[in-house]
Amino acid sequence: MGLSTNRIVFGIHNITPYRRSDYLPYGTLLVLGGGTMTLSAEMEDLFGGSNKFAWASESKTITSDFTASVKSMPDFLFELFLGASVATTAASATGTVDALVNQNGTSILDAATGIASVSAKAGSEADLKDGIYMVKYASATTVDVYCLTNISFAKGTDVTFVDDSLKITATPLTVATGAAVTIPDFGLELTGGSGVIAFTDGDTAIFKVAAAHNGFSDITIGKSTTEFPEFGMVAIAQKRSNKELFEIHCFKCAGSGFPIPMEEQTFSIPELNIKLLYDDELNAIAKIRATKGL
């Protein structure tokens, strides 16, 4: 019969975390840099007399970890490893303008004496530019508008900042009762409240804009109610040319935290650290299935 074929593991294909309660997958990670399961034992050595070497050694606790280098960041990654809550917005061919929110003071957003709403200007949606916008008091009836990024200033009509303050309105915009005033070349308009407009010095309000998009996720991290759910996980190596498969099934996993690097001209590749815990029902932490090819 001779020797058996050597078992050789090559590459990685995917990692799929799932809910332990019903095995429903959270999703799968396919764009991967690698994954490693590590079982590391702490040893207790016995020394005695004049002998410089240990007489005996016994293993104590074993640390069981799985590390992964991931090159994509789906929503479930933030839920599992950062305890985040995720709200998704459907695709929009015309863009999405969030509601105006008072940031400092209360006079900018006011249905009677301030700005009642901000919205995309009908027919000018192509000029919408992604970003966070700030509306600031200029006088009792006028405001200046600022934007925190110029990343989309080439969408529609090209624009630039007015100056280093990141202001985008060359002159203050006059807000009149019940009337809409346009933020020039940005596809936006502010609508005045129903009463006498009266802004207060120093007050500001903010809103966000997403130009035409295929959907987006708002991911909130760090709530006081943050939880890190336990999950199961299957990691599968790349199928070899001889059809061999190698699968690691981890029954009870816990993950907490990961970095989000943003470096010059480089893809972001978070590193995940996953604890592999003992499952008392299955009496194991993991199971490996190594399938021989035909």
Image (spheres, grey):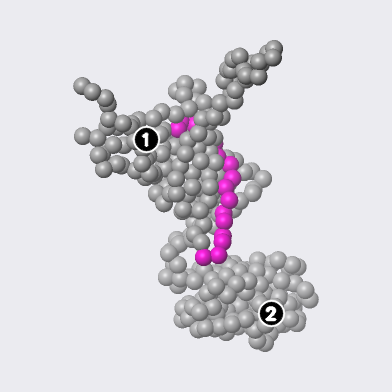
For the C terminus, the quadrant is: top left
Which mark lies nearer to you, 1 or 2? Answer: 1
Q: Judge left or right: residue 272 versus residue 142.
A: left
Instruction: Verify whether residue 193 appears in magenta.
Output: no
Residue 192 location in percent, x, y? Answer: 64, 78
Q: Earlier in the sequence, mark 1 or mark 2?
A: 2
| Residue at figure coordinates x 75%, y 68% from the top left | 105
Q: Is residue 114 visible?
A: no
| Residues packed near mark 2 inside 10 Å, few (<14), some (14 to 19) or many (20 plus) | few
Residue carrying label 1: 247
Residue 164's tag is 2
Residue 120 location in percent, x, y? Answer: 52, 75
Instruction: Verify whether residue 261 appears in magenta.
Output: yes
* Magenta stretch, residue numbers: 250-265
| Residue at figure coordinates x 50%, y 37% from the top left | 66
Q: Judge left or right: residue 287 versus residue 180.
A: left
